[in-house]
Amino acid sequence: MSNYVSKSVRKNILITGASSGLGYEMARQFAAMGRNLAICARREDQLLALKTELDAINPDIDVLIKPLDVLDYDAVERVFNEVKAYFGQLDRVIVNAGMGKGQALGKGYFHANRQTAETNFVAAIAQCDAAMAIFREQNAGHLVAVSSLAALRGMSGTTMVYSATKAGVAVLMEGLQMDLLDSPIKVTTLFPGYILTDINRDMKNVMFRADLQSGTRSIVKAIEREKPKAYVPGITWWLLGHIMRRLPLRILKKAGGQ
Ligand SMILES: NC(=O)c1ccc[n+]([C@@H]2O[C@H](COP(=O)([O-])OP(=O)(O)OC[C@H]3O[C@@H](n4cnc5c(N)ncnc54)[C@H](OP(=O)(O)O)[C@@H]3O)[C@@H](O)[C@H]2O)c1
């Protein structure tokens, strides 16, 4: 008999980038659903504040704080294994840590583009690798990666490298889905549109930007469905994704591609 964990019982969840924004709010919503959580990020004070909230939301769950810089690839593997050892079984990993500090090419900002590329893509590979080693051994688990609607097309200016990294994540996850076609291990790629967090708080005139609670609610629902791909939040961004794929570059740029 397969030891496949039914999708309704993803009890032990690890979230990276849990110290703010989507990761923070996902943790709150999964806590309300009774899931145990391992919350990872660099800012330990934020993780402590989150744990206090989670304990208040649901005193019956187990919350593990794991300070982690995802650019420390050895630490990624070590921390994921520690979380698995602590819970006994790791049911879901959400590869969410990310940043958007890129700049247009040729303007002296290679260091910022490199940091964005390493955090969003190379560190995502490290996280997926560490999660998959555990899931393969368990023959069970659900790997979720947060890409972006910006992955669907090239973007110019400050979003250029960001969109390339998110396209990289989406393609990586599709390859993984191919590897796992006949496996009980599930893979989901999320393509969020704008949801208000620190990553876009300073952006002006952002159309259709969802607030954090409702945007994350849509993300959590999509994660629970465990489909291979999800465009969130809601039908609006699914539709915008379809339109974005077909727009000529000049119109795409006017529509917000920078
Ligand atoms: N909000 C949106 O509209 C939107 C849309 C599409 C995709 N996304 C994606 O959603 C994910 C979450 O972003 P957000 O919107 O919630 O932004 P956010 O509030 O800025 O959160 C980013 C998170 O990533 C963590 N992080 C960054 N660099 C890290 C590192 N080196 N090591 C460990 N953790 C690191 C940060 O934690 P520390 O600084 O404490 O380490 C923080 O918890 C990102 O991958 C982003 O690209 C967001």
Image (cartoon, rainbow, N blue to C red):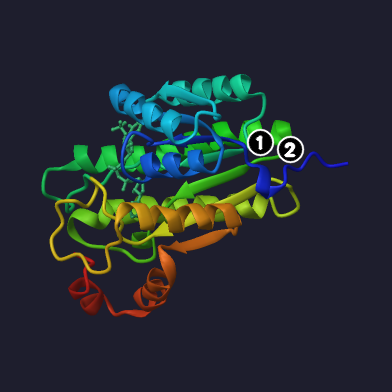
At horizontal 32% and vertical 79% (from top left) the residue drawn is: 247
Residue 171 seen anywhere in this rendered image of the structure: no
* The quarter of the displayed image where residue 241 is located: bottom left
Q: What element does badge 2 sit on?
A: loop
* The quarter of the displayed image where residue 155 is located: bottom left
Q: Is residue 33 left or right of residue 246?
A: right
Residue topped by disc 2: 139
Instruction: Kindly tell me whether mark 2's CB lies below 8 Å from ligand 1.
Output: no
At horizontal 27% and vertical 63% (from top left) the residue drawn is: 209
| Residue type of the residue flagged with mark 2 | Asn
Residue topped by disc 1: 135
Q: Is residue 59 left or right of residue 193?
A: right
x, y percent for residue 54: 43, 32
Q: What element does badge 1 sit on?
A: helix
- Labelled pair 1, 2 in contact (Cβ < 8 Å): yes
x, y percent for residue 162: 29, 51
